[in-house]
């Protein structure tokens, strides 16, 4: 089961889109809430995902779906700690923790976690940057563009919780909010990244530690989700690898529904179609050179990633004559 992962490798000529499989230890996540809430089930599920071929696991102790209620630092730690410990005892695979709170991140790093996946991209907790920069572990850090923070009064943002600590100030000034209200979603993303990356640089976070996430599904319209996916290469132009989470997002379900394709999660075909649509996006992401995709399932995404990355690396592919069908 054990295998080595070079998490810092982003060389296009040897690009392999890695699968980061999700282990939600929550009672209310949007697609698998309560399924793996108990540590024993979560650990078993994580080991199964690794056995299926996942390259790493992303453990979450707080749901951030639309309509969710944020939990305390202590509750989040109590949910994830036994799962981290159990997986660390049984596997050497890289572990990520999905948290935007520095106290949770600090505790997770003390337990041996390799990656901090921050959906607020340093703008939710003012202590996160110093924590990541000062860690002896030199963890990978996923810095996500969060449209909910960038435009909190946008209709698509109002369904989400406010990603602020009690004593924290808004992520942007009123002048910045006014500016972002007048520009495209792609320009907003770049503005957000520029602000967050400045914070990272000043704190001393190394560039090679950072992956950028375009924040698909967070306070975005259908069109904006699609535009960000279509423009993923713009993130590579900034000089950073990409961490992409699109698995089972609502906009995918809307696309299927508009095409009159079954999406009812209570039926086998509806649930399977949601995951098939997610895997299709993994293929598209891999064809654009995305380094890591975050997924709920593994098998279909592995197949999709191998096809997509083959397209991305077409120039270096062997020029083989294909045999006839037998």
Image (cartoon, rainbow, N blue to C red):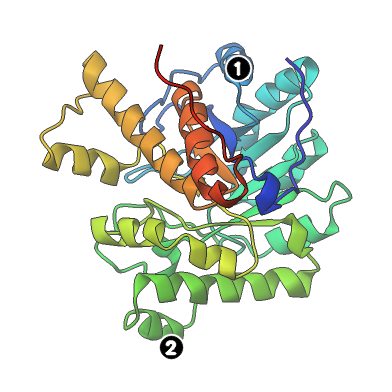
Q: Position of residue 233 (x, y in %)?
A: 50, 62
Q: Nearer the viewer, residue 66 or 93?
A: 93
Disc 1 crowd, CA 10 A, few/some/many (<14, 14-19, 20+): some
Q: Would residue 213 appear left or right of 122 to someone viewing this image?
A: left
Q: Position of residue 225 (x, y in %)?
A: 33, 56
Residue matched to label 1: 39
Q: Position of residue 71 (x, y in %)?
A: 51, 41
Query: Based on the displayed image, in which of its 4 quarters is residue 317 positioned?
Result: top right
Residue matched to label 2: 175
Mark 1 and mark 2 in contact (Cβ < 8 Å)?
Answer: no
Q: Would residue 152 appear left or right of 239 to someone viewing this image?
A: left
Which residue is located at x 81 percent, y 68 percent?
A: 204
Q: Is residue 317 visible?
A: yes
Mark seen at residue 149: none
Name above or below for residue 92 compared with residue 237.
above
Which residue is located at x 77 percent, y 70 percent?
A: 203
Count the marks.
2
Q: Nearer the viewer, residue 80 or 20?
A: 20
Q: Position of residue 300 (x, y in %)?
A: 44, 25
Q: Residue most toward the bottom?
A: 175
Which residue is located at x 32 percent, y 34 percent?
A: 277
- Locate the C terminus and report the quarter of the image it occupies: top left
Q: Secondary structure at mark 2?
A: helix
- Locate the N terminus and report the quarter of the image it occupies: top right
Q: Is residue 60 visible?
A: no
Q: Secondary structure at mark 1?
A: helix
Real-space CA distance between mark 2 and mark 1, rounded to the nearest whole angstrom? 45 Å
Q: Would residue 37 appear left or right of 128 to someone viewing this image?
A: left
């Amino acid at each position: 089961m054990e295998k080595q992962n070079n998490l810092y490798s982003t060389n296009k000529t040897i690009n392999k889109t890695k699968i980061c499989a999700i282990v939600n230890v929550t009672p209310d996540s949007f697609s698998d809430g309560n399924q793996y809430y108990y540590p024993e089930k979560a650990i078993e599920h994580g080991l199964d995902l690794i056995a299926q071929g996942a390259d790493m696991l992303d453990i979450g102790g707080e749901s951030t779906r639309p309509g969710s209620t944020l939990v305390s630092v202590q509750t989040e730690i109590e949910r994830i700690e036994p799962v981290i410990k159990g997986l660390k005892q049984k596997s050497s695979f890289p572990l990520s923790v999905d948290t935007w709170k520095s106290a949770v991140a600090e505790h997770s790093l003390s337990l041996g976690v390799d990656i901090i996946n921050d959906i607020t991209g340093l703008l939710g907790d003012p202590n996160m940057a110093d924590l990541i920069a000062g860690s002896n572990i030199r963890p990978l850090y996923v810095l996500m563009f969060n449209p909910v923070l960038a435009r909190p009064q946008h209709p698509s943002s109002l369904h989400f919780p406010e990603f602020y600590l009690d004593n924290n100030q808004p992520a942007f000034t009123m002048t910045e909010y006014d500016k972002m209200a007048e520009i495209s979603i792609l320009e907003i993303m770049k503005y957000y990244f520029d602000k967050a990356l400045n914070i990272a640089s000043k704190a001393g976070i190394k560039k090679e530690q950072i992956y950028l996430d375009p924040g698909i599904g967070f306070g975005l319209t259908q069109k904006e989700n699609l535009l960000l996916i279509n423009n993923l290469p713009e993130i590579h132009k900034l000089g950073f690898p990409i961490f992409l989470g699109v698995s089972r997002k609502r906009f995918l379900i809307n696309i299927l529904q508009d095409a009159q394709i079954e999406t009812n999660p209570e039926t086998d075909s509806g649930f399977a179609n949601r995951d098939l649509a997610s895997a299709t996006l993994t293929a598209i992401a891999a064809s654009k050179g995305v380094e890591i995709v975050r997924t709920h399932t593994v098998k279909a995404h592995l197949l999709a990633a191998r096809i997509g990355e083959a397209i991305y690396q077409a120039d270096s592919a062997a020029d083989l004559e294909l045999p006839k069908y037998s």
